[in-house]
Each structure stands twice: as structure tokens, then as C-alpha cells.
Image (tube, rainbow, N blue to C red):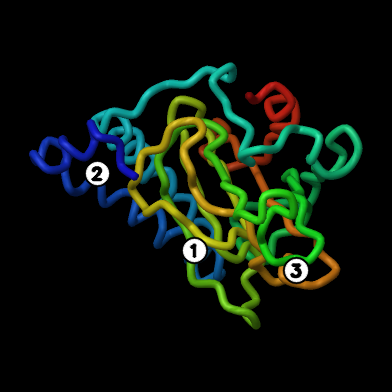
Amino acid sequence: MVSLLSSALLASGQVAAPERAACLTFQQLNDQIRDQTIKRADAQRQLTALLPRLDAYYQVAGGQTYAITDWVFPLKGYTAAVIGGVRGNGYQPKGYDYFKGNRHGGHPAHDLFIHDQNQDNLDDRTRQPVQVRALTGGVVVALSKRWAPGSALRGGNYVWVYAPYARALFYYAHNATVRVEVGDLVRPGDVLATVGRTGLNASQKRSPTHLHLMQLRLNAQQVPVPTDCYRALLTAH
């Protein structure tokens, strides 16, 4: 769902193809990191070189800056009451390393649970899928939408959104369906996906149906490091 402005710019050729291609390049790099088919130093070098291109694409395509007061709770029809754990203690960043991809440790994220006792990916109250909404605005830079049972991929069907103004990446995982494409600009509250049970562990019967939400901040060395978004979730509308 590229914004109307960015769609017009793309059609007119005002958004340079190499800059839009930066999003696809991030997807490729992220896949390599995920699957551990690239050396850490090479991945870091490529990421550092890629970020300015993503920043430029977001700006030229009409991307906006959003304050934390603009942020929207990621599950439509739900509130912060469904955040797992007690007072946000489900967030466990120790052991996490972005560059370890699918083999990373820790749990630097919050799991947001829906009402789905029979595990059919539908809200028990409405009998409808639960929409996953963008917490804040940004550009879709990576996704997976064809997860199948038996895959070792932990995130299942996921979406990565990069917010240049916040210097942060947001990761939405275990989705049933993905509703966006790489390169799409999204605003707070835009629909990214529907909640599901995809992923190595999330697909197991022992796992309640939930959205796995993670925020990574880019530090001075342009390394994505965990950031706790618990307080932001509490105030998101």
C-alpha cells in the first residue's frame, strides 16, 4: 500500500529506481542474515551503506515523521491488556544479536495475545481475523509470506518496517497473512497483516495465538539493538 503521493512519484519517475530498489536490497540482505549465509562483517558493511539509501527513498516518496503520540496499538480491537507477561517482563533482550539471524537468542520483544482458544486464527468474539496494524510509520523493507509447516523459520510470516526518523526497525512476526509489499510506505495504524500461528514454535499447540512485536534501534555504529517499546504500547491509541 504505497501512499498516494509515493505512487504518483513512482509513476512519474521522480523517485529514483535505485532508491526504491534499496528496499529490495535490504530484503535480500536480511534474508542472508536470517539464513546465516553472509559473514557478520560483510553484513554490517552492507547495512551501513544501505541505510542512507533507505532514508532518501522514504523522504522522496513522501514519508512523514511521527511522534510517539501518533503511535497506534498493533492489534485492532485490542488494548495493552493483552501484552504477555507481567508489566512487560516478557521482554528479555539478553542474548539477542540481529546478525545471528534465525539463530539469535533472547526474546527482545512483546507478545500480544488474541482471543483464539480453538487456534483457528480468528477472534473468538467476532469470528474474524485480527488485523495487525503498524505501530508507527515507515517503509516496509523485508517480509516473508509463504511459511509452511515444517519450516525451521522462527518468525513464520513476518514484516520488517524501517522508520528513518526514529532510526528504528520494527518486526511483526507469526502472521497468518501479510497485506503489504516491500517498498510500501505505511502510516501508524495501516494494516500490515493478520494475526496467525506461523513459525517454528508459534505453530505448536502449546503456543497461544499471538503477534510477536520487536523494536530495534540503530546505535552510533548502525547496529540494530533491542529497544523496549512497552511504555509506548501502553500509551498507543
Alpha carbon distance from label 3 to label 1 = 16 Å
Q: Which mark is residue 201?
A: 3
CB atoms of marks 3 and 1 within 8 Å: no
Residue at point 44%, 48% (across, down):
47
Q: Residues within 10 Å of mark 2 (few under 14, many from 20)?
A: many
Which residue is at the far front? 126
Element class at badge 2:
helix
Q: Which mark is residue 19?
A: 2
Amino acid tagged 1: Ser
Residue at point 42%, 46% (across, down):
140
Q: How many marks?
A: 3
Q: Whole-percent x and y of residue 159?
A: 51, 53
Instruction: For the C terminus, give its image quadrant.
Output: top right
Q: Is residue 76 left or right of residue 177?
A: right
- Residue 89, picture quadrant: top right
Q: Is residue 103 left or right of residue 51?
A: right
Q: Whole-percent x and y of residue 170?
A: 56, 42
Pointer 1: what residue?
A: 144
Give the mark nearer the N terminus: 1 vs 2: 2
Element class at badge 1:
loop
Q: Is residue 164 above or below residue 13?
A: above
CB atoms of marks 1 and 2 within 8 Å: no
Q: Is residue 126 above or below residue 157?
A: above
Q: Whole-percent x and y of residue 132?
A: 57, 46
Alpha carbon distance from label 2 to label 3 = 36 Å
Which residue is at the far right? 86
> 154 or 100: nearer the eye?
154
> 148 or 23: nearer the eye?
148
Q: Is residue 81 left or right of residue 39?
A: right
